[in-house]
Image (spheres, rainbow, N blue to C red):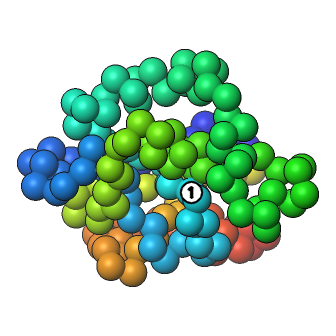
């Protein structure tokens, strides 16, 4: 069994590291994701915004419910539509809506946004293990291994049968 998704802050967040960057919305760089994000997607695991985008992001779900998301479908390449049986995923909707609202999305590295998605898995022996899931690696800004992260592995890399 697994506890709900967790946000794992790997270091203290310092907003002053972010304000030096140009942009309206800041997301972790996932330039080494496997499989890679499609050009029509933006990573949506974590978002930090300036005031210009705060209202839009604060009302994001209301905006989605009031938006004809077929516009997102129209921007998809045919290869992603799988005929007409495939819609936009959350990453595609985020990119499409940010573009529609003319927000500049900037990819930042681990030093500016020290965040990873993780999960705590309860094992049958009563212990638990924490691992990264939906891992968002970056070639330009690789995860810095610290005492806090040295024992945390990607969930996909764990041999669950041996535990």
**Rendered residue at 54%/72% (across/down):** 33
- Foreground residue, 41 or 128? 41
The residue that mark 1 highlights is: 41
Q: In the image, is 1 to the left or to the right of 15?
A: right
Q: Residue at x 79, y 68 (%)?
A: 79
In the shown orientation, is residue 157 left or right of residue 135? right
Q: Secondary structure at mark 1?
A: loop
Q: Quadrant of the C terminus?
A: bottom right
Q: Position of residue 34 (x, y in %)?
A: 60, 75
Most extreme residue toward the bottom, as rendered? 139
Residue 100 visible in the displayed image: yes
**What residue sits 31% from the left and 74% below the top?**
141
Q: Quadrant of residue 158?
A: bottom right
Q: How many marks?
A: 1
Quadrant the N terminus occupies: top right
Relative side of 61 to 158, left or right? left
Q: Does the image show residue 6?
A: no
Which residue: 61% across, 25% down? 67
Rendered location of residue 150, percent (x, y): 38, 71
Q: Residues within 10 Å of mark 1 (few under 14, many from 20)?
A: some
Pick the residue in front: 88 or 83: 83
**Residue 31 relative to residue 141: left or right:** right
Residue 4: where, in percent of width, then height? 61, 37
Can you tell which quarter of the image residue 30 is in?
bottom left
């Amino acid at each position: 069994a697994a506890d709900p998704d967790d946000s794992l802050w790997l270091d203290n967040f310092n907003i002053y590291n972010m304000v030096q960057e140009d942009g309206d919305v800041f997301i972790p760089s996932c330039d080494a994701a496997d499989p890679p994000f499609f050009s029509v997607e933006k990573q949506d695991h974590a978002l930090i915004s300036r005031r210009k985008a705060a209202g839009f992001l604060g009302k994001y779900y209301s905006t989605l419910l009031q938006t004809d998301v077929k516009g997102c479908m129209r921007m998809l390449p045919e290869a992603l539509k799988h005929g007409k049986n495939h819609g936009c995923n959350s990453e595609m909707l985020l990119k499409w809506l940010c573009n529609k609202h003319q927000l500049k999305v900037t990819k930042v590295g681990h030093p500016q946004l020290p965040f990873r998605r993780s999960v705590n898995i309860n094992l049958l022996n009563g212990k638990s293990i924490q691992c990264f899931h939906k891992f968002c690696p970056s070639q330009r800004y690789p995860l810095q291994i610290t005492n806090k992260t040295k024992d945390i592995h990607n969930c996909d890399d764990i041999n669950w049968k041996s535990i």
